[in-house]
Image (spheres, rainbow, N blue to C red):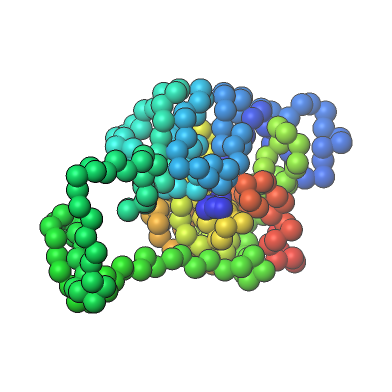
Amino acid sequence: MYGRANVVLIAALGILALGGCAQRQQPAPVEKVYQGRSIYDYEANSLRGPSYQVQKGDTLYSIAFRANIDVRSLAQLNQLREPYTIFPGQRLQLRQPVQGAPSDKPVVRNPSTRTETVDPQQKKEYVGVESKQKVTSSQPVQVPKVPSEVFPKSNQIAWRWPTENSVIREFTASVTGPKGIDFAGTKGDSVRAAAAGKVVYAGNALKGYGNLIILKHNDDYITAYAHNNKLLVNEQQWVNAGDTIAEMGNTDAARVKLHFEVRFRGKSVNPRHYLPRGSQ
């Protein structure tokens, strides 16, 4: 859901009819049985260091989520290929080393080497990054600027409902309950972006959520859209609020539905606190 974006797997859950829990005669049917650590066990943007040592139960996807990095970029940085196999104790780089960063090792100078004073008015000499050849120039070296991603502030996010279909399960803060809300639907119904943002994940590698999309709206908020039949956007793509990003389905679910989450700084929050009132 960025930080920066992460997301996603539910433990044992039942389908709860709204308003009818107190009069249920039989226990709710179980949809999924907990099968190990999931994205719910992690917090987005919680890894901020330059590297990370893999722990038991980690996956490259969970590490990328916690480090707010695209999983493919993380794999490329560490020269990993699909299926992105990692092992406990392995050290992964989370950040690209800074070019020209000062070394921690002391510089050993040859005492026989004579140091000469250089006239500051002389032409500047520098080493090209790519060619490694010395180049002379009478102009200052121009360092190209990398364009930064500009996300709206939290109070500037314009929220909207991801579907017009009815809600079949509400948010609950309980440990084993859903961390979002579920919508009914039929296969192929449109799933829309709840706010403008960037696609930071589009795939099906997160256990229990089927075909999943995660949008990053700023450093505080991400949203997740699970169980889709077809994904219509790609990672790193920018979308506007209301854009169709997927088709509803039942991947990794007992029925066709949309599972929708809002996360604030990695913590699950009730989507109804943000979505417009008067709908659903």
Q: Is residue 168 visible?
A: no
**Viewer-nearest residue: 141 or 163:** 141
The quadrant the C terminus occupies is bottom right
Identity of the residue drawn at 70% across and 50% down:
269
User: Which corner quadrant of the image does residue 14 belong to?
Assistant: top right
Total marks drawn?
0
Specify whether 184 is left or right of 109. right
The residue under the point 14% across, 65% down is 135
Outermost residue on the right side: it is 22
Q: Can you give x and y, in whole percent of width and height, for residue 21 in the image?
A: 82, 37
Q: Is residue 118 left or right of residue 87?
A: left
On the question of residue 143 being in view, the answer is yes
**Residue occupying image coordinates x 54% and y 42%:** 47
Q: Can you tell which quarter of the image residue 194 is in?
A: bottom right
Residue 22 falls left or right of residue 164: right
Q: Is residue 250 above or below residue 234?
A: above
Q: Is residue 190 above or below residue 138?
A: above
Q: Residue at x 50, y 42 (%)?
A: 49
Q: Position of residue 216 (x, y in %)?
A: 53, 56
Q: Position of residue 54 (x, y in %)?
A: 47, 28
| Front position in the image: 248 or 180 | 180
When the figure is inspected, residue 89 is found, relative to residue 23, above or below; the finding is above
